[in-house]
Image (cartoon, helix red, strand yellow):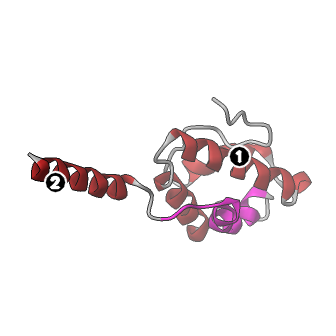
Amino acid sequence: MKGVIIAVLVVLAIVQVMVRPIEAFDCGDIGLKVIWCAPYLTGYEVQPSFECCNGVKIIKTMLATRDDKIQICNCLKWAVTNYRSPEIKDAPLAALPVKCGTTLPYTISKNMDCDK
């Protein structure tokens, strides 16, 4: 019986490690994923670049949990309100995921509510 309990605890420990994210991220990581979107978001380019869209698609894969969604939302909001904020256009910002052929669980904007 003691061996069974130990085996169950070992399996639970392995499962716990497996479901944990491999690496955490911060707003700097998110910013680096979308830095290539600046020419599109500021109106200098009519379409987002491949690098920009690749970053948006990578961000989508990072949205594993509700906490991830909230953290990434706050990072995106911070980025668009602090990086060249007056130059970033609202329409391209909101259209970015669709222009990149993907979706996000929220519309990116300078005043998005990340707690929803």
Above or below for 100 versus 1: below
Specify the amino acid type for callout 1. Answer: Asn
Residue 25 on the magenta span: yes
Specify the amino acid type for callout 2. Answer: Ala
Q: Which residues are magenta?
A: 23-41
Residue assigned mark 1? 74
Residue in view at x 46 percent, y 47 percent: 64
- The circle on residue 4 is none
**Circle nearer the viewer, 2 or 1:** 2
Residue 55 placement (x, y as % from top left)? 57, 63
> Relative to residue 71, is residue 6 drawn left or right?
left
Labels 2 and 1 touching (C-beta < 8 A): no
Residue 82 on the magenta span: no
Magenta segment, prevailing SS (helix, strand or loop) = helix
Task: State which tag comes first along the sequence, 2 or 1.
Answer: 2
Residue 4 placement (x, y as % from top left)? 11, 49
Residue 46 placement (x, y as % from top left)? 70, 59
Residue 98 placement (x, y as % from top left)? 55, 47
- Which residue is at the far front? 2
Residue at mark 2 to residue at mark 1: CA–CA distance: 41 Å
Q: Nearer the viewer, residue 26 or 84?
A: 26
Q: Nearer the viewer, residue 48 or 7?
A: 7
- The circle on residue 7 is 2
Residue in view at x 57 percent, y 57 percent: 56
Above or below for 68 versus 50: above
Q: Residues within 10 Å of mark 1 (few under 14, many from 20)?
A: some
